[in-house]
Image (cartoon, coloured by chain):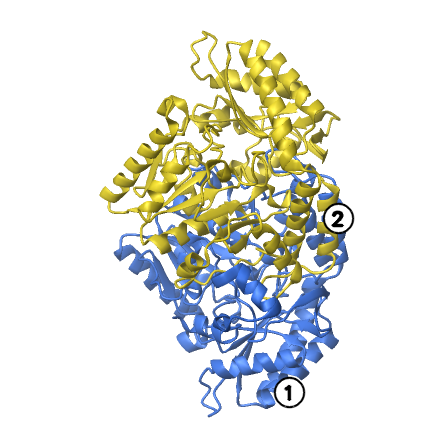
Chain colours: A blue, B yellow
Amino acid sequence: MSQIRQILDMNAFDASTGGEGAVKRRLDNLGAASVLFYREPIEMVAAKGAWMEARDGTRYLDFYNNVPSVGHSHPEVVAAVSAQVAKLNTNTRYLVEIVDDYLEALKTKLHGQLSNVVMTCSGSEANDLAIRVARAVSGKTGVIVTETAYHGNTALVTEVSPSALKRSPLPDHVVIVPAPGAAAYGEDIANGFRAAVVAAMETLETRGHGTAAFLADSIFSSDGIFADPAGFLLPAVQAVQEDGGLYIADEVQPGFGRTGDAFWGYERHGIAPDIVTMGKPMGNGFPMAGMAARPEHLAAFCEDVGYFNTFGGNPVAAAAGLAVLRVIAEEGLQGNALRVGAHLKAGLSEVAAGSDRVTEVRGAGLFLGVDLGAEDGSGAPDAGYTVQVIDRMRAAGVLIGAAGRFGATLKVRPPLCLNMAEADRFIEAFSGAVKG
Amino acid sequence: MSQIRQILDMNAFDASTGGEGAVKRRLDNLGAASVLFYREPIEMVAAKGAWMEARDGTRYLDFYNNVPSVGHSHPEVVAAVSAQVAKLNTNTRYLVEIVDDYLEALKTKLHGQLSNVVMTCSGSEANDLAIRVARAVSGKTGVIVTETAYHGNTALVTEVSPSALKRSPLPDHVVIVPAPGAAAYGEDIANGFRAAVVAAMETLETRGHGTAAFLADSIFSSDGIFADPAGFLLPAVQAVQEDGGLYIADEVQPGFGRTGDAFWGYERHGIAPDIVTMGKPMGNGFPMAGMAARPEHLAAFCEDVGYFNTFGGNPVAAAAGLAVLRVIAEEGLQGNALRVGAHLKAGLSEVAAGSDRVTEVRGAGLFLGVDLGAEDGSGAPDAGYTVQVIDRMRAAGVLIGAAGRFGATLKVRPPLCLNMAEADRFIEAFSGAVKG
């Protein structure tokens, strides 16, 4: 079992105990597909802004969930969804003005070549389609991903999601590269990562697959959050593109302003992706996602297969998506992510300076990774300790999770509406949690 | 290109013309993935009950779309979605009461062994998961489907959707059987269909795959709607189950009361499916779907792969789903489907009796298929004439589409709230259309 699976299990409710009350109901309904946070799961009843409220009245500061990105239950999104669902909810086989209004608004955020957008229901569907488009365009079948990547839950996308696999080996056409951190590549991450990707391309060539795509989340969320130095991703991407492969930027995690310095995570690296996939924060919780591609690339795929997505691009999704874009602009949330993220990073770095168990703080905007290390001060990743810290943070009223190959990186990922006081509250809670 | 793809293209907007105005916007945004109904697409602005309203003020009776199954913009669904999206919209890693309320309500509709439900965003995701569960349980990889089946749009599900493939051959592990009509099997459809499925199992065995699943939509929607005689599906399903394969009932089309006599289409055939997948009408347009399975089957899959679906089972979907179940019960929509469906079938059969171009009327509840034949009275399927009839129906204010291997079957599939007057209006429009 991969280490990240182990840590997820360590921090999850132990279903083998059977549970009682609301937990038992959940297990009876979802069975083995039930994955509940925490050994003692939380029942949520409401949420607003950066806060969630549990059944027992406890209020939690949400540093975990990047779906309600403009804030839980944001009134503009609520109003937009409520108005549109009462008016018209149909599919893209008819023309519906708000759908094209949304797509045009979204496209102003993308570089000009990516002028076609296929709307889907989930990031999984978007990545599933993106891989097939890359295969149709390149005539190759191999895919390169990072070692602890997660790109979704369909059969095809699970193949390229090492962190989802419990015991199955990766298929022959998937080759992994270590996450782009100093641990694997030393000081020169850009060239080291490029060399790893080139080696993976050679492996795929040797195996007879060739490289259809390099698929990466540009903030490397599941791998443990790697953002610096800005630009490190470009040489690897160029190597793939020069070979006729496509770079698929999985923006499900970093997209929609989270990294603060730009709307998409890949912009940090000066890349022009061939395909961009997006999802989670796109509708602030309304199920919607999408894949942006060049018209000629999409056409190459559609020669073989007729693609239609019943719920994809419905008018209610468009209304939610438009509201999200409007709120990000009106409330200056990308700028807020930059400012509050910098404040948070500085505060956490200060905590790290005074603790031999906080070994690194990194990231961009409101997406930070905080490494936690062993008691002996060796700096070795400590998954058990990470679970302890997560539990202590929960006791202090803060929701947070872990990521990374060793499950020893806190994934700091609050809604983009986070204010300075809330950031301070997190820093204080974290400081207390790592002192224990 | 498959014949059903040809007919879909015949009845779709011809994108090569470029379009203008709203059509041009759509093509610029969706590119090759844009599939618009009608040579002259319709721009919709609102919908209520069984009616849709176009930009130019024309009101259309919707006999096409089975997603808004309890009626477009149903006030109870609208109220449920609006209230929940304002309160809490999160994922199943927390406990949320309304999610388990929904799953328990849904499970009262399923036979007792199917006590685990995985919520997904789309029927595609549900079928993608179902095939993998069947493979994990059976240890086999082959899948049997009908010749013009459509089960969704992911990579895996496209492989088992012959009607989506334009020129790619079916993969080696997929074997098709003719649709269960008299054309292929004569009078004894039950035994003929069983024999075809057994032959497909033997082919899969010979090819070294074995049979993981027989996957069928129990109303055979894309194949042209085959409902009778009730029970014909049972022997084929039993043959698969006796061999250790699973029967996956794809209820995305017939489920939620549409066939009138039962809540699920498979009940008509006295079957106990191993897995049930569902989607389209489940949330009346809110993107939601699901897969119901036995706990031990789901567990077998989850040993290998950690499955999580971010938007699947969110509280807003649960609220929409609960409202749909409540409306079906309160408004007696299953009974209405039976009554109004019978009236509609009788009326259409009367039209057929007076026309040599309407060659058969069949189906159950509010899901009927009407075959249209050649001018020479030979009864040969006539796709071109079907497009004419669809266009005439549109001119008469009725939306309808085609299905079937030859694209010559009208797919009669109005919302379940259809009343007798609306049914009569359809019969009248159809009678006029086939006289021309």
Q: Which chain carries label 2?
A: B
Residue B187: x %, y % from top left = 38, 22
Residue at position x 39%, y 51% from top?
A: B134
Q: Nearer the viewer, residue A293 or A324?
A: A324
Which quadrant would residue A191 be assigned to in this image?
A: bottom left
Residue A218: x %, y % from top left = 51, 62
Q: Which chain carries label 1?
A: A
- Dot 1 alpha-carbon crowd within 10 angstroms: few under 14, some 14 to 19, many 20 or more: some
Quarter placement of the C terminus of chain A: bottom right
Q: Mark 2 points at which residue?
A: B79
Q: Distance between the residues labelled 1 and 2?
A: 44 Å
Q: In this view, does B148 lie above or below A4?
A: above
Residue B179: x %, y % from top left = 40, 30
Q: Can residue A339 be seen in this view?
A: yes
Q: Is residue A351 above or below residue B404?
A: below
Residue found at the very far top of the displayed protein: B376
Q: Is residue B381 above or below residue B419?
A: above
Mark 1 or 2: in front is 2
Residue at position x 65%, y 41% from top?
A: A99
Quarter placement of the N terminus of chain A: bottom left
Q: In the rendered structure, find residue A432 and report the number of the disc placed on it.
A: 1
